[in-house]
Amino acid sequence: MHAPIGHFEHAAPAPDRLDELTRPVADAVRAWRGSVPADQIVYVDTDPEWADTATFVERYGQELLEQAANCVVVAGSAAVRPCWPRAWSCPPPEST
């Protein structure tokens, strides 16, 4: 399988690589009911040496800055303060 973005040497449908995923992520893939079929969720095998964001996009493709995330969100909450996109940390809460 070829990843639709980036230049990864190894890519596979996430349901085929459940053994490579952490338990919460694997469970989320198993229970997936999103608008995109689960077999279109792509697992890419990356080297931890390339995990830093700047190094990651240099190695796997500059377009990943705009088209991908190097994490998986399994659950979210609307109670969490929003962060600016691609921010390294959240802004401090506004004074009340």
Image (cartoon, rainbow, N blue to C red):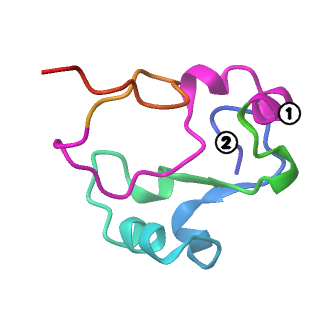
Q: Is residue 68 left or right of residue 55?
A: left
| Depth check, front residue: 29 or 35 | 29
Query: Could one spot residue 47 in this view of the protein?
Result: no
Q: Which mark is residue 59?
A: 1
Circle 1 SS class: helix
| Depth check, front residue: 81 or 46 | 81
Q: Position of residue 53 (x, y in %)?
A: 71, 34
Graded by Cα atoms within 10 Å as few (under 14), some (14 to 19) or many (20 or more), the crowding at tag 1 reads: some
Residue position marked by numbered label 2 in the rendering: 3
Q: Amino acid at mark 1?
A: Arg
- The quadrant holding residue 58 is top right
Bounds of the magenta span? Answer: 54-80
Q: Is residue 5 above or below residue 78?
A: above
| Depth check, front residue: 64 or 52 | 52
- The quadrant holding residue 31 is bottom left
Q: Quadrant of the C terminus?
A: top left
Q: Which callout, 2 or 1, points to the residue nearer the camera? A: 1
Q: Amino acid at mark 2?
A: Ala
Graded by Cα atoms within 10 Å as few (under 14), some (14 to 19) or many (20 or more), the crowding at tag 2 reads: some
Q: CA distance from mark 2 to mark 1?
A: 14 Å
